[in-house]
Amino acid sequence: GKKSEKLCDLLNLAEVEADVETKMKEEALDALKRVVGELQAAAARGDDEGGECRKKIAAASEVRLLAKEDPEARVTLAMLGAIPPLVSMIDDESRDADARIASLYALLNLGIGNDA
């Protein structure tokens, strides 16, 4: 009857919403993976190559922004391996000061609210 049709519609709607949410989560995860990949690549290269420093700052800044508002993103970024390249960027004395500062801010945001 009518009731089961309504329920069916609701279930279909819930399923569509769940699919959309899953897709959004997958896209968000892909974005986080891309950022960590860029960060790792930037940290691995020397600063002598043209524009490398800008790439490091851009990657670190993106991590900082992604981690700022989103506790889930913080955990995911850490699990994907964002922390070691940021630490190496801060440790390297030859690094541009701006890149070191950007890395430091990114690390601070990754650490916020992670009580683990």
Image: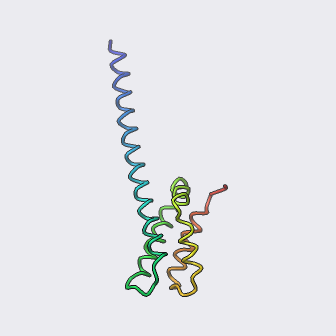
Q: Residue 1's quadrant in the figure?
A: top left
Residue 52 versus residue 44: which sits nearer the camera? 44
Q: Residue at x 57, y 65 (%)?
A: 109
Q: Residue at x 49, y 75 (%)?
A: 43
Q: Position of residue 87 (x, y in %)?
A: 58, 73
Q: Is residue 114 left or right of residue 79?
A: right
Q: Position of residue 102 (x, y in %)?
A: 51, 75
Q: Position of residue 96 (x, y in %)?
A: 50, 85
Q: Residue at x 63, y 57 (%)?
A: 114
Residue 58 versus residue 70: which sits nearer the camera? 58
Residue 91 versus residue 3: which sits nearer the camera? 91
In the rendered image of this protein, does residue 41 appear above or below residue 30? below
Q: How is the image coloured?
A: rainbow
Taking the view exactly as shown, the residue that stands out farthest to the top is: 1
In the rendered image of this protein, does residue 100 appear above or below residue 111? below
Taking the view exactly as shown, the residue that stands out farthest to the right is: 115
Q: Position of residue 103 (x, y in %)?
A: 54, 74
Q: Residue at x 40, y 38 (%)?
A: 18
